[in-house]
């Protein structure tokens, strides 16, 4: 029992010694002194520039919101629409071919042959094989076959750009190598 009292007494003495004076007071005093000596350096704000009004010298020009300006813009847009409509109108008037129901990325070129002196491409779609000649249509963007080679088919597509105008673009379908 005596050992227990000695152990408790020694723990108590160590605890009291730990709560005693330490070097912390010196550090806190140094931090307060440094904080009081440090002053931020803020440059003064420059004076605002003098406002100088500009003279409007376009008074003789066409007002941007006038009927005349609107008429010019509408005429320009109408002439562009006629050109764009002329590009897609023949495509809308013809009968669609079977391969126009599928997107180009679902088609794969698996080969090409020469039939009656003309190149013919073999296209696989949904596990069915189709023969495609020059002038046939593929894909959902009015794609017309304009060139068939051993390695690829070249198409001329008619698509709408970001502004909604019809434009032509060239697309290709590459020969798909069979993986073993």
Image (spheres, helix red, strand yellow):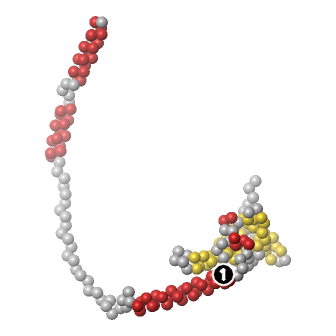
The residue most toward the top is 2
Residue in the foreground of this view, choosing between 147 and 156 = 156
The image quarter containing residue 140 is bottom right
Q: How busy is the neighbourhood of tag 1: few (under 14 within 10 Å), some, or many (20 plus)?
A: few
Q: Is residue 25 above or below residue 140?
A: above
Residue 172: percent from left, percent from top? 67, 70
State the residue position of label 1: 92
Is 144 positioned to the left or the right of 71 in the image?
right
Residue in the foreground of this view, choosing between 123 and 21 = 123
Residue 72: percent from left, percent from top? 45, 90
Point 22% across, 21% down: residue: 16
Is 64 positioned to the left or the right of 26 in the image?
right
Quick check: can you spot residue 62?
yes
Point 55% across, 80% down: residue: 165
- Count of numbered tags: 1
Residue 125: percent from left, percent from top? 73, 65
Residue in the foreground of this view, choosing between 130 and 13 = 130
Is 9 positioned to the left or the right of 98 in the image?
left
* Quadrant (top left/top right/bottom left/bottom right) for the N terminus: top left
The image quarter containing residue 24 is top left
Residue 97: percent from left, percent from top? 73, 75
Q: Is residue 99 above or below residue 34?
A: below
The image quarter containing residue 47 is bottom left
**What secondary structure is marked by label 1?**
helix
The residue most toward the right is 116
Point 27% across, 14% down: residue: 8
Quick check: can you spot residue 111?
no
């Amino acid at each position: 029992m005596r050992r227990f009292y000695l152990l408790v007494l020694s723990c108590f003495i160590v605890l009291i010694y730990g709560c005693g004076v330490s070097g912390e007071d010196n550090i806190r005093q140094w931090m307060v002194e440094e904080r009081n000596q440090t002053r931020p350096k803020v440059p003064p704000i420059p004076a605002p520039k003098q406002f100088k009004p500009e003279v409007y010298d376009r008074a003789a020009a066409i007002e941007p919101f006038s009927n005349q300006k609107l008429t010019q813009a509408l005429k320009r847009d109408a002439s562009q629409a006629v050109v764009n409509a002329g590009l897609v109108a023949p495509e809308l008037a013809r009968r669609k071919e079977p391969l126009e129901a599928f997107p180009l990325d679902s088609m794969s070129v698996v080969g090409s042959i020469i039939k009656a002196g003309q190149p013919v491409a073999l296209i696989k779609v949904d596990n069915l094989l189709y023969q495609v000649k020059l002038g046939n249509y593929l894909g959902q963007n009015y794609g017309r076959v304009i060139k068939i080679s051993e390695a690829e088919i070249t198409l001329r597509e008619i698509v709408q750009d970001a502004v909604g105008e019809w434009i032509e673009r060239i697309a290709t379908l590459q020969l798909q190598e069979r993986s073993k």
